[in-house]
Image (cartoon, rainbow, N blue to C red):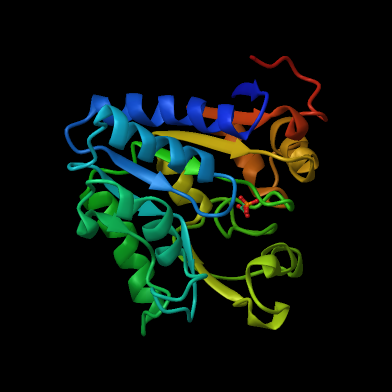
Amino acid sequence: MRIIVVPDKEAMGKRAADLVQAEMEKHANPVIGLATGSTPLPLYQELVRRHKEEGLDFSTTITFNLDEYVGLTPDHDQSYRYFMDQNLFNHLNIVKKNTHVPDGLAEDIEAFCEEYESMIDDCGGIDMQVLGIGSNGHIGFNEPGSSLGSLTRIKTLTDETINDNARFFDKREDVPTLAITMGIGTILHARKCILLASGANKAAAIKAACEGPVTAMCPASILQIHRYETLIVTEDAATELTIRVER
Ligand code: PGA
């Protein structure tokens, strides 16, 4: 595990953008896995800046998002499709049909999840997966207790995740309780993973992910066995780490 500690969110976004850009430049059709939430926003702002100011080209890039709430329409302002369009895709020269977000309205969710895995395989697998981490150690919506070998499927959100995400909705009851998420096995299949974390509320989860045992109770800890895993963590999220880190 490579752990890079940076002073603030902006630096985190730039370091992550350097890695994503380098990966994009290695492939004719780069396949990048993306995440939602507040954490990756500085990365997306930096990618948009590099596209607009430096001509970073997304015309052949393919993306797969980790997860989506069940039951929200793509134009609902809290759906992850809407989030990705607003914060990234609408500002790039990416081909919309090459951007994949799980379909939270799929009638046959199980069939859709299988199809999502097939679509990833048909594109040759994910070259680089961007991840955030929940305060409970989740990656995607793989909540504590998730099977470490799981593939894309439907999950029930924990109370902790619903509480964390309630800030984005008018009221807590509006937060969906189900989501479609890539599995932990899906994430492990990505050739490279980069996990971003910022804020003191992530310090305990980062400690458990990096220094705790590999356990389904902290899904991010499985990244300890990934062949290429880079963490980019702000100072305040790294306060509980005792192992040597890069700055
Ligand atoms: P956040 O969410 O980036 O909004 O903190 C991260 C996550 O829940 O994976």
Snapshot quadrant of residue 169: bottom right
Snapshot quadrant of residue 159: bottom right
Q: Could you tell me which residue is drawn at 41 percent across and 66 percent down? A: 82
Residue 116 position (above or below residue 124)? below
**Picture coordinates of residue 123, whole percent (x, y):** 22, 48
**Picture coordinates of residue 195, whole percent (x, y):** 56, 37
Residue 95 in the figure: left or right of residue 37: left
Q: Is residue 227 visible?
A: no
Q: Please tell me which residue lies in front, 143 or 133.
A: 133
Mark count = 0
Q: Quadrant of the C terminus?
A: top right
Residue 41 position (above or below residue 236)? below
Q: Could you tell me which residue is drawn at 52 percent across and 40 percent down? A: 42
Residue 122 in the figure: left or right of residue 193: left
Residue 54 position (above or below residue 114)? above
Q: Could you tell me which residue is drawn at 57 percent across and 32 percent down? A: 10
Q: Is residue 232 visible?
A: yes
Snapshot quadrant of residue 54: top left
Q: Please tell me which residue lies in front, 165 or 204.
A: 165
**Picture coordinates of residue 115, whole percent (x, y):** 29, 66
Q: Quadrant of the N terminus?
A: top right
**Picture coordinates of residue 53, whole percent (x, y):** 30, 31
